[in-house]
Image: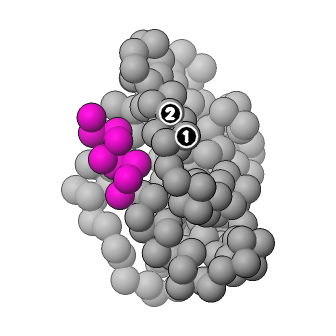
Amino acid sequence: MAREQHRELLIYARVLTRNEEQSRDLVQESFVAAWQHMDRFDVSKDVGPWLRGIVRNKWKEMLRKASWQVALDDDGLEALESGLLGWQELRRDGGPGVFVKLEGCLEKLPEGLSASVQQFYYEEKSSEEAAASLDIASGTLRKRLERARQALRDCLAK
C-alpha cells in the first residue's frame, strides 16, 4: 500500500506545503497515522482518498501548530482532490493513463531538463543536492525545472 501511494502523496503534500522537506515529513507522519488507525479503513473503498485525507488533516494540524497562513482554502483542496481522482480513474480504467503518458513526455525532454527532473522528483534530492550533482547553479536548476514542467504540461495536453 505505501509504495503504491507514496509518490502521489508526496506530490499532493508538495502542492500543499510548497516545501520539499515539509512535504516529506508530512507524508511520513501520515503513513504513521494510517498505520496506527488501519482499523478505521473500510477495505471496500479505495485507499488513495483515505490517505490523502490523512495528509490533508496532518497539514491542517501543522498549520495550526505553526500559525502559518493557509495557501489553499477548502475549495482549492476540493479541486485538487477532484483532479487526483480523475488521474486515478484513468490509471484504473486502463485508459491512456496520465502516468504512462507522462513517462513518454519525459523521454522527449532535452537531456538537461530530463536530468533535472530525474534528480529532483524521482531521486527526491533537495534542490541544492540536485544542482550540485548536475554541476549547475541552484537558480539554473529552478529554471530547468520550470521549463520542464511547462514542456510536460504542453505534452500532456496534446
Question: Which residue in the structure is indicated by mark 2?
Answer: 104
- Residue 67 location, x and y as percent? 45, 86
Q: How is the image coloured?
A: one colour
Q: Which of 116 and 112 is in front in this view?
A: 112
Location of residue 151 with respect to 37 vertically, above or below: below
- Residue at image position (50%, 69%) is 144
Q: Nearer the viewer, residue 34 or 28?
A: 28
- Looking at the figure, which quarter contains the N terminus? top right
The residue carrying pointer 2 sits among few (fewer than 14), some (14 to 19) or many (20 or more) residues within 10 Å by Cα, namely some
Q: Is residue 151 inside the magenta stretch?
A: yes
Q: Is 64 positioned to the left or the right of 76 in the image?
A: right
Q: Is residue 110 inside the magenta stretch?
A: no
- Residue 157 location, x and y as percent? 27, 39
- Which region of the structure is painted magenta? 150-158
- Residue 154 location, x and y as percent? 30, 47
Three-letter code, disc 1 = Glu
Would you say residue 9 is visible in this rendering? yes
Question: Which residue in the structure is indicated by mark 1?
Answer: 107
Classify mark 1: helix, strand or loop.
helix
Q: Nearer the viewer, residue 11 or 68?
A: 11
